[in-house]
Amino acid sequence: MPSSSSASPPAGRPDAPPFDLVPTDRASVAAADHEARNWTFDKPGPVRVGSRDHMVMFARMLLETHNPYKPRVLDWPKLDPEAHARLTSLPIWDIAVQTEGRASLRVLDYAATITDPLLHEAMVMDGNEEARHKKVLSNLVEAYGVVLEPEPEYKGFRDVEWGWMRTGYSECIDSFFAFGLFEAARRSGYFPPDLVDTFEPVIQEEARHILFFANWAAWARAQQPWWRKPYFLAKTAAVWAVLIWDRLVMARDMGSASKDTNFTATSGSIGVTMTAAEMIDICLAEDRRRMAGYDPRLLRPTTVPFVIRLARRFMGKAKPATEPARA
């Protein structure tokens, strides 16, 4: 359904408190959730990548699909002892909280350099939503008695665009697999349904973030003068090289993984037993589902799905899913 309503002002602006318009009744919550997943640019016709219309489209998408939930008022369900033990035993919470905090600061560092008012507003919204993810995770571990390590001091990058690109491409990798792992955990019943429902807006928010970033990256690449394009492409390749190396280190030794790397839990750590082919099929299906409601003229993140589809060709047939994917 098209959406052209004004977004709630992002945190950090002087004219409004952060995320202040929070729906409370069931119908309003459902409407906010629908608007966060479905959006169409109100200007008809083709949109050229790199044009002003392209930037307006992806910036407005992020602003107008903002879901104004407040982390503090999320209803954390009471867990039975077995579910509580499963949740608190996961070795991811320190990395998760620190990752979201770093992502927020890196996005806001880059946002401070943007002069276009609309793109600046969208970038600030992105950074503040990352901070809200950290708050959600912090509230979760507080609610269930998980003790976190002290956070290390944040050290930004001198090249703030590098920090933003590193965060964006990292989320493109991790969110793709997180979509599948979250769905696999939902199907398996590893986490109670109420807890899954509580986290659902956060997972969908990551879909919006990588959609926004993929379009920014294409727009920014098109904006480069001819003499700077090789440098921008080299920077992009360097970011990918760093992220791939980080994940190779993590795969080699999860226990000593770099705390400067976004995390994705392994399927075993959430109690899901399936083949790599089955997991890949769920990830691909969930990636399509979560992106389906947004204007088809918006570019989708393609690198990770392309590589995964290529790898999938060399695997056997997966067993039929025990539960059909959600519509």
Image (tube, rainbow, N blue to C red):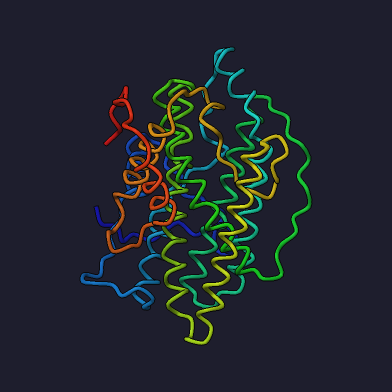
Classify residue 79 by image quadrant. top right
User: Residue 197: x and y, percent?
Assistant: 43, 31
Q: Residue 12 is drawn in which quadrant?
A: bottom right
Residue 164, given in percent of the width and then of the height, sits at 58, 63
- Nearest the viewer among 88 and 74 is 88
In percent of the image, x 43 and y 61: which residue is there?
214
Q: Quadrant of residue 51?
A: bottom left
Is 156 located above or below residue 143 in the figure?
Answer: below
Q: Is residue 50 above or below residue 206?
A: below
Which residue is painted at 36% across and 72% down in the image?
54
Q: Is residue 157 left or right of residue 233?
A: right
From the viewer's perspective, tell me whether residue 44 is left or right of residue 57. Answer: left
- How many numbered tags mark residues here? 0
Quick one: which residue is furthest to the top in this view?
Answer: 81
Q: Nearer the viewer, residue 47 or 41?
A: 47
Q: Position of residue 211 (x, y in %)?
A: 41, 57
- The x, y position of residue 311, in whole percent, is 41, 45
Closest to the observer, 314 or 76 = 314
Q: Residue furthest left?
A: 45
Residue located farthest toward the front when viewing the structure as drawn: 314
Q: Residue at x 33, y 40 (%)?
A: 285
